[in-house]
Image (spheres, grey):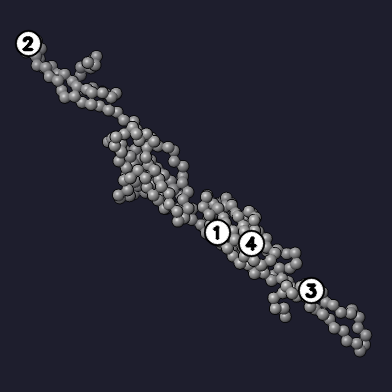
Amino acid sequence: IIPGENGQTLEVTENGEYEVGIQIGAGGTACFGVSNLVTVEFYPEPTFDPSDPLNLCQGETTVLDGTPTNASAFTSIDYQWFKDGVELIGETNPTLTVDDSGQYQVVIDANACDDVPNTFDVNLVDYQVSLPIPPQNCVGQGETVEVVPEFTGLTDSEISQVTYEWSTGETTPTIQLSEAGTVSVTTTYEGCEESVTETFTFFNNPQVSIAGSPTLCDGDVNTLDATPVNVNDLDSPT
């Protein structure tokens, strides 16, 4: 017996088995009856770990897990996934494998309680890097040519966060080359890598010092020699 509870309704706040006795009339003509037994069980609201925005590299997949952290408290859990507010037909499992950006949401119905949503923001990292051939392809003694990567799919602000690993061992955004060769660079942004390899061909500037006598007597012939001192490093000098 619940003291003081003699009304037609009862507000229940805890688990238990409830029944109500009803008396009609009084004295010797009173009728008394007892209702069926009702079992009441309260369930907590589903809870989730905080979900930070996820970065997904192009060509890769990630698995979103919508299982509540207190799943063991429920006897039945139904799931329905959505992407950008649109229901994903047939996606009713606790997990969802995705390969594209968007806002994903799983709606939980646990033991027929109110639907509870959990949201995942997925950002697709999709960019490319190239190594353009510098317009300057002639290199003088002691000179170098700067190699500068170019990006598509990243803003200037995002490019400033890129890290570099060159085949030369350097980790700077650009490198200086003094001779021809094949160079590669691996760039990393938000955990996603893109690599590129390029072959650079440079030509040495001729180093000329004209040889011959500075004076010439009448009737004499003087031969001036303009052969570059680095002739062996030149490609088909004319």
CA gap between label 4 and label 3 equals 28 Å
Disc 3 residue crowd, few under 14, some 14–19, many 20+, Cα 10 Å: few
Report which residue position mark 2 lands on.
Answer: 28
Secondary element under disc 2, as helix, strand or loop, is: helix
In front: mark 2 or mark 1?
1
Give the quarter of the figure containing the N terminus.
top left
CA gap between label 4 and label 2 equals 107 Å
* Residue type indicated by callout 4: Val
Q: Residue at x 34, y 38 (%)?
A: 116
Secondary element under disc 4, as helix, strand or loop, is: strand
Mark before the other along the chain sequence, 4 or 2:
2
Say which mark, if any, is on residue 195: 1
Give the quarter of the figure containing the C terminus.
bottom right
Please state if 180 lies on the left or on the right of 113 as rendered.
right
Q: Quadrant of residue 198?
A: bottom right
* Residue type indicated by callout 3: Val
Report which residue position mark 3 lands on.
Answer: 229
Q: List the single residue furthest toward the left.
A: 29
Mark before the other along the chain sequence, 2 or 1:
2
Q: List the single residue furthest toward the top.
A: 27
Please state if 20 lies on the left or on the right of 65 as rendered.
left
Q: Is residue 87 visible?
A: no
Disc 1 residue crowd, few under 14, some 14–19, many 20+, Cα 10 Å: some
